[in-house]
Image: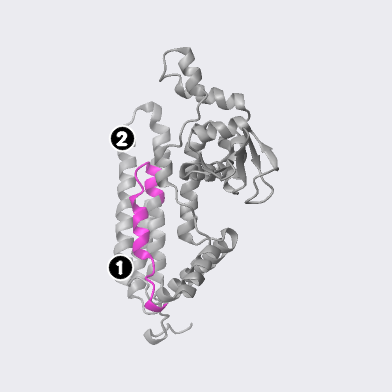
Amino acid sequence: MPEPASPVQRQVAPAGAPSPRTCIQVARQAAILAVTAADDAMSAVCSSRSGAAARLEAVMHAAHKEAVEAERHADRAEQYADDPTMPSSAPLYCARAAVEHAVRAQSAAGVDTTAAALRAELERKLTASEHAERETERRREEAEREAEERAATGMDADNRDRAARNRYLAEAHVAELGWTAGHVRVLEAAASGRLYWRDGRARQAVRRGMRNGGRRISRERTEDLFAARFLVAARQDDGTRVLTPSPMGQVALELARLHPAGLHDSDQAAYEARFARVRRRHKRRDDQKAAARVLPPLDSSARKLYRRPITLTEQRAQVEREAVDR
């Protein structure tokens, strides 16, 4: 028969593991919770009516079985803690088993599984070096994710958040503009610096600075956007007016690009949407129709909250310009 291991040969629990005393206390507390749950199940049997007796007895037996196991593992935790021939991790193993049986006993009895909270007390505490290793790994993963996001979006975290807030604004306000894709095309032509008004017609010049020829742009939509102050006009020496987006028009254009689903499929659908919005503000039918023909301004809150994101390329260019200026 082999000789029992000496205390010197005893396996040591990993650093940070709960002490044997803690394991015994947790195991004993788990056993108490399990026995209490079994007692509650037995009390339910004693006070039950005949119709529910069979089911409650099954519950009582299941809870009692788990309580017995919880007590057995609690007793073993105490025995193994005093036995030098047992690995130092044995009390921890027994305590964990006692907790699991206590949870099952409470679950079988239909009471709150408060024993589950005891698991945290048996978790191994990390050493300082392990904490440092995990923190280094966490920072490395964060850096990798940030690099991937920057490569995909061309923006840093702050500007990605700004872009996300802008998308939320767009979803909330684009439909209220009562626009079609045609209104967006007019503003895009104006944003290019090539939209001009001459002889009662709107055209998009081939190149910036030209004020003759080019593609025709919807006269009605141009007039509506200008009347609603989404466009501003700069008169030239030859009488031509160059149309550019106003500050409100620029923001509205950016929001419409972010949420094209908020645009209406046709001019009629856009008019009906505007009509539905103004119907409550006007009593007479003619007043309602007249108000619906006018494009509403962009909500003031959207104008205040919108902030254009700045890409990494733009940031680098700005740094280079500032360096040259210095």
Q: Which mark is residue 46?
A: 2
Q: Main secondary structure of the magenta part?
A: helix
Local packing at callout 2 (Cα closer than 10 Å; few below 14, some 14-19, many 20+) is few
Horizontal side of 154 relative to 118 (left or right) equals: right
Q: Which residues are magenta?
A: 104-129
Name the quarter where the C terminus is drawn.
bottom left
Horizontal side of 54 relative to 201 (left or right) equals: left
> Hey, what amino acid is under mark 2?
Cys
x and y, in percent, of residue 69 in the image: 40, 56
The reply to whether the magenta stretch includes residue 114 is yes
Which residue does the image show at 48% across and 14% down from the upper left?
Answer: 286
The one nearer the camera, 38 or 265, is: 265
x and y, in percent, of residue 55 in the image: 42, 34
Horizontal side of 77 relative to 325 (left or right) equals: left
| Label 1 sits on residue | 22
Which residue does the image show at 45% across and 59% down from the upper left?
Answer: 158
Secondary structure category for the residue under label 1: helix
Secondary structure category for the residue under label 2: helix
